[in-house]
Image: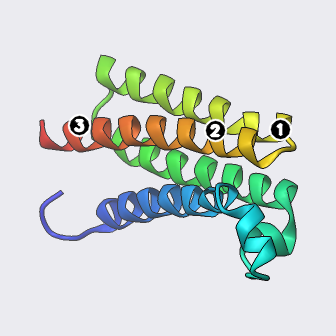
Amino acid sequence: FGDPNGAAVLLGLGLSLNRLSLSLLKDYKDAPGDAKAHKRTFLLRYGGTLTARLSLGLAVVGMGMVLVVLASQTLSTQYLVLVVTAGWLLYERSKLFRHQDYVGLNRVFHDCLYYQLIFDTMVVLWLSI
């Protein structure tokens, strides 16, 4: 994007929201120990449902921002692949609502992390072309 402009700021903000949405989920793996240690993580303070909803909401907004910025650059087959990947990532994140145990939630978190890395790599590749 060259000099910082509105598109670059939106792209950076969108990618940051995606990272924040994942950061909320990392507490699933430590929840039993955090509860014993009386840590006040977002998950333990507000519960799994609100954590999942906020994570999904941040991901939708963040990916939407990224996709809007990239669509303004050019539309192509690569863009379609990026949209499909974003859709798959959101589908994977929706699985948070199917699990009640921290083991299952942590497994979904790791799947989301994996697909988020693929999405982020595709964005970087897109920008380098």
Q: Does residue 109 sit above or below 5 in this rendering?
A: above
| Disc on res. 126 | 3
The location of residue 10, given as percent across then percent down, is 41, 62
Mark-to-mark CA distance, 2 and 3: 29 Å
Q: Which residue is depicted at the point 12% across and 35% down?
A: 129
Q: Between 129 and 100, which is closer to the camera in this rendering?
A: 100
Q: Which amino acid does the dot numbered 1 rest on?
A: His
Look at mark 2 in the image and give the residue it sits on. Answer: 107
Q: How is the image coloured?
A: rainbow
Distance between the Cα atoms at labels 1 and 3?
Answer: 34 Å
Q: Residue 39: x percent and y percent?
A: 73, 81
Q: CA distance from mark 2 to mark 1?
A: 10 Å
Q: Element at badge 3? A: helix
Count of labels in the image? 3
Q: Nearer the viewer, mark 1 or mark 3?
A: 1
Q: What residue appears at the point 80 percent right and 74 percent down from the top-left corner?
A: 36
The crowding category of the residue bearing disc 3, from other C-alpha atoms within 10 Å (few below 14, some 14 to 19, many at least 20), is: few
Q: Amino acid at mark 2?
A: Arg
Query: In screen coordinates, is 74 left or right of 93?
Result: left
Q: For the residue marked with disc 3, what is the amino acid?
A: Trp
**Number of residues whose C-alpha sits closer than 10 Å to that of mark 2, classed few (under 14), some (14–19) or many (20 or more):** some
Which mark sits nearer the N-terminus, 2 or 3?
A: 2
> Residue at position x 35%, y 67% from top?
9
Pointer 2 and pointer 1: residues touching (CB < 8 Å)? yes
Q: Which residue is mark 1?
A: 99
User: Mark 2 or mark 3, which is nearer to you?
Assistant: 2
Within 10 angstroms of label 1, few (less than 14), some, or many (20 or more) residues?
A: some
